[in-house]
Image: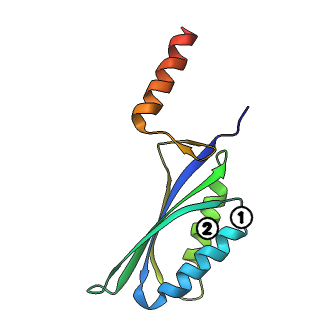
Amino acid sequence: MIPVETLYQVQLGWKVSAAAHIRALLLSTITRLPVTLHSIRGEQDDTNEQAHIRAEMTTAGRNNEAIEQVVMRLSIGPSPSVLTASWKRALVPRWHGLELSEKELAGTVSAIHSRLI
C-alpha cells in the first residue's frame, strides 16, 4: 500500500524585529524532523509591527507529534517573540505529491463507497 502523506498548515505570528530569527529557526527545526516543507507564505503588518507566515508541510502518514514539535520549538524560544502559533491538518490529502481537490476527493470517496455496498 502506498503511504498517504498528511498535509499540515502551521501559522505563526511574531514581532517584526524577530522575523529573520524565527524564519531561520523554523527551517532548522523542520530539517531535524520527518517533515517536508512544501510552501511558506508571509506578510508583514508594519502598523502593528507584526509578521505572519503560513507554512504547508507534509509527513508520511499522520504525524501530529512532529508538527507539535515544530510549533513548540518556535513558541518556547529564548525571547517572547512569537505572538501566535497554531497548526491544523489540511482537509485535502496528498499522495506522492498529487494534491486532490475537494471535488476529486469526494468523487474518489463515492467510488470507493459504491464498491463496498
Quarter placement of the N terminus: top right
Q: Residue 9 placed where, x, y %?
A: 49, 58
**Residue at x 47% of width, y 43% of height:** 91
Judged left or right of residue 5, residue 83 is left
Q: What residue type is disc 2 on?
A: Val
Comes first in the chain, label 2 or label 1: 1
Secondary element under disc 2, as helix, strand or loop, is helix
The local secondary structure at tag 1 comes to loop
Q: In which quarter of the image is residue 84?
A: bottom left
Residue at the spot of label 2: 70
- Image-based side of 66 in relation to 99, left or right: right
Residue 57, by quadrant, is bottom right
Q: Which mark is residue 15?
A: none
Whether residue 80 can be seen here: no
State the residue in front, 116 or 37.
37
Q: Looking at the image, which residue is at 55% across and 50% down?
A: 7
> Are circles 2 and 1 on residues that touch, CB within 8 Å?
yes
- Residue 99 appearing in the image: yes
* Residue 33's disc number: 1
Coloring scheme used: rainbow
Question: Residue at horizontal 61%, vertical 79%?
Answer: 25
Could you classify mark 2 by the number of other residues whose Cα lies within 10 Å: few (under 14), some (14-19), or many (20 or more)? many
How far across and down, in percent of the image, does residue 111 sit?
50, 18
Q: Is residue 13 above or below residue 99?
A: below
Query: Compared to 30, does 95 lie above or below?
Result: above
Q: How far apart are marks 2 and 1 (CA)?
A: 8 Å
